[in-house]
Amino acid sequence: MAVAVLPEKATHQQTRTFNQQLVLRAIYDRNETSRAELARLTGLTRTSVSALVGELLRDGLIEEVGTGPSTGGKAPILLRVRPDGRHTIGVDLTEPYFAGALVDLRGRIIRSVRLPLHGRDGMAAVDVVMAVIEELANRNGQASLLGIGIGAPGIVNSRDGTIRWGVNLDWANVPLGAMVEERFGLPAVVVNDSQAAAVAEFTFGTPPRPNNMVVVRVGRGIGSGIILGGRLYQGDGAGAGEIGHTIYGAAAPTDSAEPCRCGRVGCLEMTASMHAMVSAAGQLEPEVTDAASLVAALNAGNENVRRIVTEAGHRLGQAIAALISVLNVNLVLLIGAATRLGDVWLNAVRERAATAALPHLTAATRIELGAARDEDDVLIGASALLMTRELGLSLVR
Ligand SMILES: [Zn+2]
């Protein structure tokens, strides 16, 4: 367990909240545990643990679940976190629709909604965010709602909940977190979508993920989330991992190529994303018009499509080699729509990543596919960040 730090001149209330979170997190991490074990795990006295457990039971956050094996005396009563003790509303602002879900404390989805954007942007798109949340909040009742976690594409300052740059939605410096908090009277967290997906993989992935890893998301766009020391690393400007708008070498002919949505030419997103592959393949093979037909043509053995997918995989592999060189992480997970391209794409990524960086660094690094629920990763991860902020849960192992 990582060490959390209490302010030097903590008030009585701060100390109590701190210790309560310490106990709750220990129960959460162990799945089931006893009061005696909690005292050992947290270093608190048995009396303090009993008092704190009593408060958590009264708050409905934990429950007693039978007895564990006796170690000589009376069999200990086991405690666990009640998955439905609190809920969060998770929201994913990836187009062409906004998706929301009611998420329990174990990252499971209870109910979901999605609303089409129909090309709306600016304040009209903010209205769609509010409508998604409203629908879930109304049908849940406020009592068990912990707050709202939102994952959004672009550069997002999650410290103050401001979307600094959301190019497709025409958002610049939109204080979405504050707007949502004011409207619903609940705490809100806003975070970059790929960073949120990385948190979901780290927090709820199986097998348990290591404390250092990078999650690269390849769909319509490309982004990544970096977990270091068991925490999301966001960088000084909250944009850490935004690799999609990096230009690697002379990746594209500059005069004829379609400009990127950031306004420049030759970004990784324009040469290695699903959008880029569909568009390149469509010029040679008219039957390729979207992600599904690209996957179908690849599986049917189309050589042109195979070459385009391999080249795109190589370009992504080069970007991943750079990440490995800077961070020296041993696990890189790939998620998003491109994972449906299977081994042709995955092998191309692995091959280039292994040869474009120092073998001493790449030899120990595994590049794997993430959990197969990429549809929900963003909203589950944003929910997990909210839980961490409000309850001290889950991001610390
Ligand atoms: Zn770009």
Image: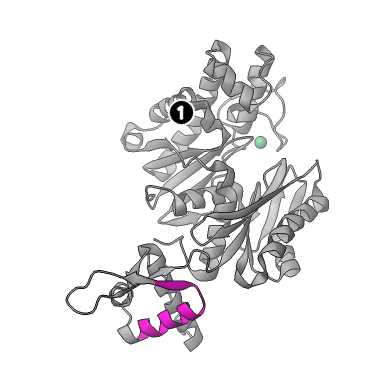
Whether residue 253 appears in this view of the structure is no
Report if residue 60 lies within the magenta region. Answer: yes
Between 199 and 11, the one nearer to me in the picture? 199
Whether residue 98 appears in this view of the structure is yes
Report if residue 293 lies within the magenta region. Answer: no
Vertical order, 377 against 266 (above or below): below
Residue at horizontal 25 percent and vertical 75 percent from the top:
75
Residue at horizontal 36 percent and vertical 35 percent from the top:
362
Between 221 and 90, the one nearer to me in the picture? 90
Q: Is residue 288 left or right of residue 130?
A: left
Task: Report the span colored magenta.
Answer: 48-64
Between 151 and 250, the one nearer to me in the picture? 151
Q: Which residue is mark 1?
A: 346
Amino acid type of the residue tagged 1 in the rendering: Leu
The percent coordinates of residue 64 (x first, y second) are: 40, 73
Ligand 1 sits in quadrant: top right
Position of the N terminus by quadrant: bottom left
Q: Is residue 327 left or right of residue 378?
A: left
Residue at horizontal 60 percent and vertical 31 percent from the top:
273
Q: Main secondary structure of the magenta part?
A: helix
Residue 243 position by quadrant = top right
Query: At numbered mark 1, what does the secondary structure look like: helix, strand or loop?
Result: helix
